[in-house]
Image (cartoon, rainbow, N blue to C red):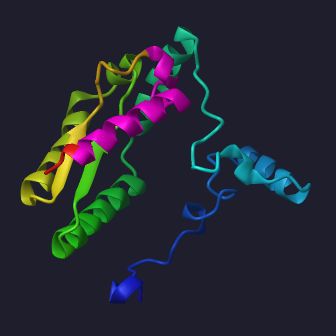
Amino acid sequence: MGYKNYPITEKPDPRNYSVILASQSKLGMLKKLELLLTGHFIDQEWTDTGWGMDYSSAAAENVLMETGKSAAIRHQKPSKLSRDAIESVNKIAELCRDKGVKLLLFTPPAFFSYRKNIEPKRLETLTGFGFKLAEASPNIRYVSYYSDLRFESTDFHDADHLDQKGAEKLSQIIDKEIIDWK
């Protein structure tokens, strides 16, 4: 059984709870394991307040252009993770509705090279899902920052990830969104 008798339907995947195992590649996993075994601390990748320190600005426009295309291609492949994520968000939304807890869902900003390579139907499906959940309950709000003009190339680490400055900017925008939510 899960938290407060909420049933766990699957055995948890340790990759979702481990800094080492969460690496996208075996090489990344080995590098983090090496750091840990040689007495270095992996948590040095984050500040005390949780900001990642390895997401500097890409600065080069060509990097943003290249990563936009490759990330868009990678993200359009159907996967079990996508289905699991949708199921998880539905369960979280249901719990929030039942408990009267406000839930803010959002689509983060993406650089235009990413946006131009995403199939419109894929984007429509994702944003439609967010809007549908928000329509179902007054305590759920969905906001899309996907093509928000407040974010410039200097706010991105790559085409689908903000850098430190961009993440802080997004956090401040979301903070205001929450404060203004009545």
Q: Is any part of residue 76 visible from this angle?
A: no
Residue 98 on the magenta segment: no
Image coordinates of residue 167 in percent, x first then y, are 47, 34
Task: Give the quadrant of residue 122.
Answer: top left
Foreground residue among 97 and 25: 97
| Residue furthest to the top | 61
Image coordinates of residue 128 in percent, x first then y, are 16, 43
Q: Is residue 110 above or below residue 49?
A: above
Q: What is the chief secondary structure element of the magenta stretch? A: helix
Q: Which residues are magenta?
A: 153-179
* Residue 139 appears left or right of 161: left
Image coordinates of residue 123 in percent, x first then y, are 25, 35
Foreground residue among 67 and 168: 168
Q: How many marks?
A: 0
* Residue 3 appears left or right of 146: right
Residue name at image x 39 percent, y 34 percent: 170
* Residue 47 appears left or right of 113: right
Q: Is residue 69 above or below residue 1?
A: above
Residue 177 on the magenta segment: yes
Residue name at image x 46 percent, y 15 percent: 153
- Of the 4 image quadrants, the one containing the N terminus is bottom left
Q: Is any part of residue 32 visible from this angle?
A: yes
Task: Give the quadrant of residue 73.
Answer: top left
Residue name at image x 65 percent, y 46 percent: 46
Q: Is residue 43 above or below residue 99?
A: above
Residue name at image x 19 percent, y 36 percent: 124
